[in-house]
Image: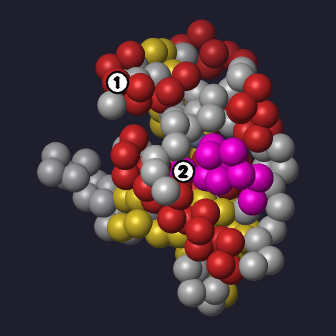
């Protein structure tokens, strides 16, 4: 196995990004997908990756969050897999922050999105154990909501308010193809 260049919106290969994902019924398959996602995220960088981004319409995503050296306040989640996730609850309070995506022009386009500050999620962990987590860190909640959207065939651009489109901006230096 090796890193897979994330599928892109607007390409035939990227059609998986707009499809509803199916539940994992065989844990072994889930683990295999998690391993592919890890390898790809390790290689290209980023804070999360969902199965449709590597062309697999299954309900699996991973999150990778660690406090960085600049101490920007990221939570110490480490690398975590969410199989068959289900968002049980989200807070009414939201925050707005710029989001990009490895599948949207190779992580070069950023736009402001409002997301809930916290949430409750049910999922299977890598051992197949059912877990319910309460996520109260806004950035962790944001990454989970972004990745969970991928499982429902949505990318962040579809979450933007029309009035914010004029403020979309490019970050050419972040282009993952430069890897
Ligand atoms: Zn994404």
Q: Is residue 21 left or right of residue 155?
A: right
Residue at 28% across, 54% down: 73
Residue 159: tell me if it is visible: no
Residue visible at 46% across and 47% down in the picture = 3
Label pair 2/1, CB-CB below 8 angstroms: no
Is residue 172 toward the left or the right of residue 163 in the image?
Answer: left
Q: In the rendered image of this protein, does residue 146 appear above or below residue 179?
A: below
Q: Residue at x 33, y 31 (%)?
A: 179
Query: Residue, x 16% and y 46% (percent of image)?
Result: 70
Give the left or right position of residue 12, taking residue 34 as reference: right
Q: Which residues are magenta?
A: 49-58
Assess whether residue 92 is covered by the magenta stretch.
Answer: no
Residue 31: % across, % down: 59, 73
Q: Residue furthest front?
A: 1
Q: Is residue 37 above or below residue 178?
A: below
Ligand 1 near label 2 (Cβ, under 8 Å)?
yes
Is disc 2 surrounded by few (<14), some (14 to 19) or many (20+) residues within 10 Å? many
Please identify the quarter of the rendering in which residue 129 is found: bottom right
**Residue 178 numbered mark, or none:** 1
Residue 34, by quadrant, is: bottom right
Assess whether residue 52 is covered by the magenta stretch.
Answer: yes
Q: Alpha-carbon distance for marks 2 and 1?
A: 19 Å
Residue reaching furthest to the top: 166
Residue 36: percent from left, percent from top: 53, 58
**In the rendered image, the vertical position of residue 21 relative to residue 29, given as above or below:** above
Q: In terms of secondary structure, where does tag 1 sit? A: helix
For residue 49, the mark is 2
Instruction: Say which of 17 and 73 sits in front.
Output: 17
Tell me the crowding category of disc 1: few under 14, some 14 to 19, or many 20 or more residues within 10 angstroms, Cα based. few
């Amino acid at each position: 196995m090796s890193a897979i260049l994330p599928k892109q919106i607007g390409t035939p290969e990227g059609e998986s990004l707009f499809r509803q994902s199916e539940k994992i019924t065989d844990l072994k398959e889930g683990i295999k997908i998690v391993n592919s996602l890890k390898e790809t995220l390790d290689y290209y960088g980023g804070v999360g990756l969902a199965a449709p981004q590597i062309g697999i319409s299954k309900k699996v995503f991973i999150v990778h969050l660690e406090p960085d050296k600049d101490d920007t306040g990221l939570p110490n989640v480490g690398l975590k897999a969410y199989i068959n996730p289900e968002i049980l609850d989200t807070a009414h309070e939201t925050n707005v922050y710029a989001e990009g995506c490895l599948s949207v022009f190779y992580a070069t386009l950023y736009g402001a999105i409002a997301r809930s500050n916290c949430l409750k999620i049910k999922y299977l962990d890598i051992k197949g154990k059912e877990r319910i987590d309460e996520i109260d860190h806004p950035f962790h909640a944001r990454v989970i909501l972004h990745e969970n959207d991928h499982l429902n065939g949505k990318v962040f651009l579809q979450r933007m308010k029309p009035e914010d489109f004029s403020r979309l901006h490019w970050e050419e230096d972040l282009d993952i193809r430069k890897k």
